Image (cartoon, rainbow, N blue to C red):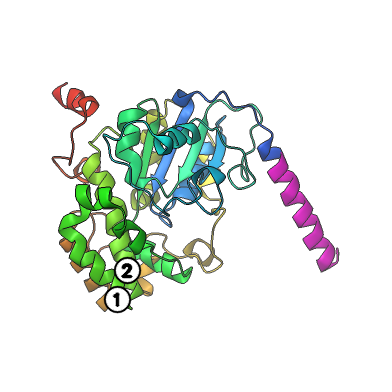
């Protein structure tokens, strides 16, 4: 048997070679080849991206909007808001460049396996607050929006000791003016609280409120974690139809693979229920807090104490949206 230290060395070298291979790619930087998968962190986006990548020719671009790992967005808030009518400036041009795949780094290309890709899949959990702008100014991009029950998301984030960065959201005047002014007191109270559960609930509400106010049905393909678990075949059929791709014959093999960011205590390794596992760990008072927070943000149509979503796909978006773009108005008129 190989000594432990040698095993670690081999693993380390293999990882470095994989990263180097991922950085060796030829990208056309054609915006029409971009698929953007957005959603809250811990909502299943990595698992979803693995399903999408199965049998595809996409270049895998991992979290290019992370300010701590990507030079182009250094100094940005952890989650930056871009107003839908924002004209061209340095920030929007940087967004456009990243969506075109004009980035090459150990971080963004660490999972890429395609040297000559046919398009790119960008997984980005920090783009929720700019999806309206992307819809209006980069219509060639195919938008995928992932959602998952707030209790499942918050429970997972707290296990990982994630920060919420509510202070960074409160410090963005445009975001407060366009979306969060009615909820300032709720957000500030959560931000001052010692209760991390309340903080993460407020963050989940903000991350979902903004895109659901800015997008219309049809602007983005909605992927709900619970739906994917309960009706995998149906949801995958809808997904690949949106992507204009045939469903791979062995897609179930990928579905059963653990995510690249799985936890050793995750339900998939313990043989637990993927959508109901959080109920074993979340206290009733925390469920009550979730119900209260969703109600205060006007999002109680999305989820309740049950593990499954309350509404149908087309009913998640808030009608009418905050701002109707010319593109969306044309769609509605049609």
Badge number at residue 236? none
- Along the line of sight, the residue nearer the viewer: 61 or 48: 61
Work out how far the residue at label 2 is from the one at label 1, CA to CA, in angstroms: 7 Å
- Along the line of sight, the residue nearer the viewer: 211 or 98: 98
Q: How many marks?
A: 2
Range shown magenta? 1-20
Q: Is residue 15 magenta?
A: yes
**Quadrant into which the N terminus falls:** bottom right
Could you tell me which secondary element the residue under label 1 belongs to? Answer: loop
Quarter where residue 236 is shown: top left
The residue at the point 39 percent across, 31 percent down is 142
Mark 1 — residue?
193
Q: Residue 18: x, y in percent?
A: 71, 44
Q: Residue 318: x, y in percent?
A: 17, 45
**Quadrant into which the C terminus falls:** top left
Res 24 seen here: yes
Marks 2 and 1 in Cβ contact (< 8 Å): yes
The residue at the point 66 percent across, 39 percent down is 22
- Along the line of sight, the residue nearer the viewer: 283 or 327: 327
Badge number at residue 199? 2
Which is more N-terminal, label 1 or label 2? 1
Res 310 seen here: no
Q: Residue 188: x, y in percent?
A: 25, 67
Q: Residue 333: x, y in percent?
A: 14, 23
* Vertical comparison of 290 with 182: above or below: below
Q: Residues within 10 Å of mark 1 (few under 14, many from 20)?
A: few
């Amino acid at each position: 048997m190989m000594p432990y230290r040698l095993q670690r060395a081999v693993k380390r070298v293999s990882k470095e070679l994989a990263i180097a291979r991922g950085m060796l790619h030829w990208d056309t930087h054609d915006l029409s080849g971009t698929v953007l998968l957005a959603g809250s962190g811990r909502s299943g986006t990595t698992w979803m991206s693995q399903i999408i990548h199965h049998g595809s020719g996409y270049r895998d671009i991992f979290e290019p909007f992370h300010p701590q790992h990507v030079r182009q967005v250094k100094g940005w808030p952890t989650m930056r808001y871009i107003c839908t009518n924002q004209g061209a400036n340095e920030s929007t041009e940087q967004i456009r460049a990243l969506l075109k795949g004009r980035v090459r780094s150990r971080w963004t290309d660490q999972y890429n396996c395609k040297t000559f890709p046919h398009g790119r899949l960008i997984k980005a959990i920090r783009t929720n607050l700019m999806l309206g702008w992307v819809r209006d100014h980069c219509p060639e991009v195919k938008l995928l929006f992932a959602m998952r029950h707030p209790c499942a998301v918050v429970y997972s984030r707290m296990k990982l000791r994630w920060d919420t960065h509510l202070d960074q959201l409160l410090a963005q005047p445009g975001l407060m003016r366009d979306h969060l002014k009615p909820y300032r007191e709720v957000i500030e109270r959560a931000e001052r609280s010692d209760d991390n559960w309340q903080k993460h609930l407020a963050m989940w509400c903000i991350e979902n409120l903004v895109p659901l106010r800015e997008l219309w049905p049809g602007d983005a393909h909605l992927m709900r974690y619970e739906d994917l678990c309960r009706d995998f075949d149906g949801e995958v059929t809808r997904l690949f139809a949106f992507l204009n791709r045939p469903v791979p014959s062995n897609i179930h093999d990928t579905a059963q693979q653990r995510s690249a960011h799985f936890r050793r205590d995750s339900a998939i390794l313990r043989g637990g229920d993927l959508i109901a596992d959080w109920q074993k760990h979340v206290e009733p008072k925390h469920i009550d807090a979730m119900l209260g927070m969703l109600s205060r943000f006007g999002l109680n149509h999305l989820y309740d104490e049950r593990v499954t979503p309350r509404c149908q796909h087309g009913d998640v978006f808030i009608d009418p949206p905050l701002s109707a773009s010319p593109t969306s108005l044309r769609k509605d008129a049609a």
